[in-house]
Amino acid sequence: MFEDVEKELEEKAFPITDEDKLIVIDIGRQERWLAKRSGRITASTLPDLMKQGRGKGVLWGETAKKVLYPVKYERRTGLTRESKDYIKNFIFGHENEIKAIEWLKKNGHEIKSCSDDFDEIVFFTPFDGFGDSPDFLTNDGVGVGEIKCTVDQGKFEELRDLKTIHDGSEYYWQFLYDTFSDDAAIITMDRIDHEANIAKLTDRIKTASWFIDECLAGNSTIAEINEYLNEN
């Protein structure tokens, strides 16, 4: 979509500035990052993916099922899904994550931004069908972190008061690693303490990815597979 941006800039009546070039580079990095994400379940959707249904023994609820449809769309069409809410939250989060990263660095945390301190936006793909972009890595390569910059003011206050996190917490399944929340509220998680839930999460993601592939193969619909798994 943006491969001709630099050419268009060159054809302007005004000379290309360094700022113009930076914009082109940023757009290119973001487009490549979106392409890597396309067709994959990503960490930001995991809190919803892990939700069970309302009935007893209903392991896959409607909320979890809805996570699969956008990914199915991307795998089927090769296009990247977009939504106004996602774009709004992405822009707000990115602008404020920069401030949070700087705050952490000034307060002695040796970290690198996954968005700004590498040639490409960091995107991990530990197994097929899943990908994750943490917000920062520790300089020693051991720790990874997530920064929450929420648009909702009430959620902002809730995160500030957060002292511990468990598998019933909203962001637990997204985190499962060293975690920093916005406005200097810091929570640390050691993965070794959560190995059983990491295995549970991995199985859930792989099953969800299988859901989608089965649908695209024409064997059934997501709703039919969902009903079968809940009954068995």
Image: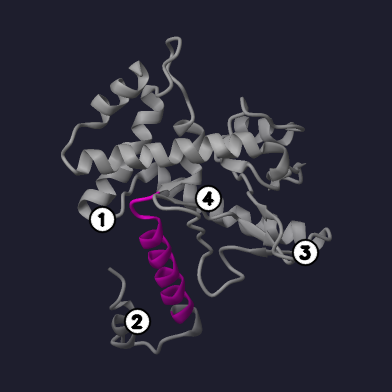
Label 1 vs 2, first from the N-terminus: 2
State which mark lies toward you, 1 or 4. Answer: 1
Q: Residue at x 57, y 36 (%)?
A: 173
> What distance separates the C-alpha of mark 1 from that of mark 4?
24 Å
Label pair 1/3, CB-CB below 8 angstroms: no
Q: Is residue 36 magenta?
A: yes
As rendered, which of 129 and 165 lies closer to the eye?
129
Image marks 4 and 3: residues in contact by CB distance under 8 Å: no
Q: Which residues are magenta?
A: 21-40
Q: In this rendering, is residue 56 above or below 134? A: above
Q: Say left or right for 117 vs 77.
A: right
Q: On screen, 71 above or below 115?
A: above
Kindly identify the amino acid type of the residue bearing the numbered disc 3: Glu
**What kind of element bears circle 2?**
helix
Q: Earlier in the sequence, mark 1 or mark 3?
A: 1
Q: Are marks 1 and 4 in contact (CB under 8 Å)?
A: no
Which tag is nearer the camera, tag 3 or tag 2? Answer: 3
> What is the CA distance from the residue labelled 3 to the residue labelled 2?
35 Å
Across and down, in percent, residue 232 comes to: 36, 19
- The residue labelled by disc 3 is 110
Task: Tell me the distance, in whole angstroms, between the alpha carbons under discs 1 and 2.
Answer: 23 Å
Between the residue at mark 4 and the residue at mark 3, the CA separation in whole angstroms equals 24 Å
Q: Does dot 1 land on a helix, a strand or a loop?
A: loop
Amino acid on which disc 1 is placed = Leu
The 10 Å Cα crowd at callout 4, few under 14, some 14 to 19, many 20 or more, is some
